[in-house]
Image (spheres, rainbow, N blue to C red):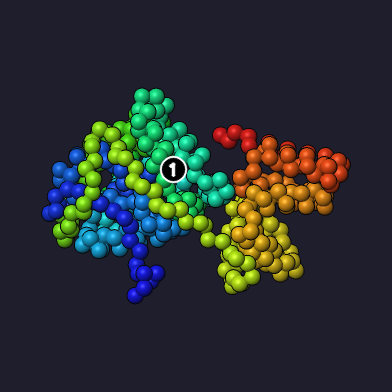
Amino acid sequence: MTDEQSPKTLQHRIDGPQDAPVLVLGPSLGTTWHMWDRQIPELTRQWRVLRYDLPGHGGAPADPSISTADLADRLLRTLDEAGVERFGYAGCAFGGAIGTQLALRAPQRVASLALVSSAARFGTPDAWRQLGVVVRANGLEQIALSAPERWFAPAFRDVQAAIVDWSVQMARAVDPGCYIAACEALATHDVRAELGLITVPTLVLGGAEDQVTPPADARALVAGIPDARLAVVPGASHLVPVEQPAAVGELLARHFEATWTQQPAVVAVPAQPAPVVPAPVPAAVPAAAPVRPVPQHAGGAAAGPDRYAEGDRTRRELLGDAYVDRAAEETEEAAGDFEDFVTRYAWGEVWNRPGLDRRTRSVITLTALVAGGHHTELAAHTKAALRGGLTPAEIEEVLLHTAVYCGVPAATSAFAVARRVIREETRPRE
């Protein structure tokens, strides 16, 4: 079996007594296993703790996955190789999404479950795909710099400068291609209709000040999962295990002690060499994995079905699911071949050629649409330009330039269309 055919596993480390039952801890997007450092002294008193990294995080191989179900399968293979049959599981946010997949796909192996800062569906598919587009265009720097605002409550940020800086460096070290793939995984993750099938004893734990997965998301999980329990930690935001390590450690320990009614069958696994982690603050971020470019079509050689799928994905990333679905509903049957042509060759091939980035292609497209007076398409591609990384100021510069070369009347009409779309797309959402 070649390396490409070999079952994929996840980078991990193990702490705690070799003969103890195994507890698995899953990380949030943009973090590493070190986000759980300060729970380890508490949890390893009675469990053997396995922590893992997402692909491209913390120096893990940059082997992207675009579904939480696939990552759950990779984790199960990792546990198989470690000789672990049954285990408890606690996952934060993205790690919680993987936890729900484990409970649905392999309930006989999950002894008990804890979902931390998690949700049955995270936001909207459009929002995650738009974030992926922004990362593809601009990299992870702005995402990393804004991470503390999403992850920590204001009071914590004010007094924990070292941890805030650590969080920025941790997010900055992620492989961009793997981050984009994770955005796609979260865009397609929706287990709302399946929550009633989860039979694993479940604790839902969240921060009272979490704006990413607010307490309403936690309550929805509790309402959907039979016999699930809810715990809300006051004063904490999204990365509640980092903000309130003692409270989270105690809540997890009590939950797993109370619900782990059957001793799991465990094969002893060898200890893995790892740096000693000081308890007071998270450990230093591991070296970042080499950045791999996002795969792009070279043009002309891709098979038809692949081009169509890639085109549909690109079109949805830039124009949004609602726009594409509405266009499909409004398309007359006679125009179906034309829609297929546009999806395959405009969106699937030309937009994904490596010769120009998407920002540049948006500039060209806006200019052409202004010149042709195609205002309906101009509105759609103004939205696409925003999703592709152009700022409102840059879009206005493009239109100003077209006023010189395409004519003032054409540019005047274009300004009216573009400003309306920019107002709609940038106004605050409740």
Residue 278 seen by the camera: yes
- Position of 176 with respect to 327 (left or right) is left
Instruction: Pinpoint residue 249: horizontal percent, then vertical percent.
Output: 24, 38
Say which residue appears at 39% left-offset and 55% top-offset.
55
Residue 350 placement: quadrant? bottom right
- Position of 269 with respect to 159 (left or right) is left
Type of amino acid under label 1:
Arg
Disc 1: which residue: 172
Residue 407 placement: quadrant? top right
Say which residue appears at 32% left-offset and 49% top-offset.
26
On screen, 189 above or below 215? below
Say which residue appears at 38% left-offset and 71% top-offset.
5
Q: Could you say which is closer to the camera, residue 178 or residue 218? A: 178
Within 10 Å of disc 1 (Cα), the crowding (few <14, some 14-19, many 20+) is many
Instruction: Pinpoint residue 290: horizontal percent, then vertical percent.
Output: 42, 53
On screen, 154 above or below 351? above
Q: Secondary structure beneath disc 1?
A: helix
Residue 91 seen by the camera: no
Instruction: Pinpoint residue 188: horizontal percent, then vertical percent.
Output: 49, 55
Instruction: Pinpoint residue 330: horizontal percent, then vertical percent.
Output: 71, 58
- Position of 233 with respect to 421 (left or right) is left
Identify the image quadrant of the C terminus: top right
Identify the image quadrant of the N terminus: bottom left
Q: Could you say which is closer to the camera, residue 350 or residue 84? A: 350
Say which residue appears at 39% left-offset and 37% top-offset.
167
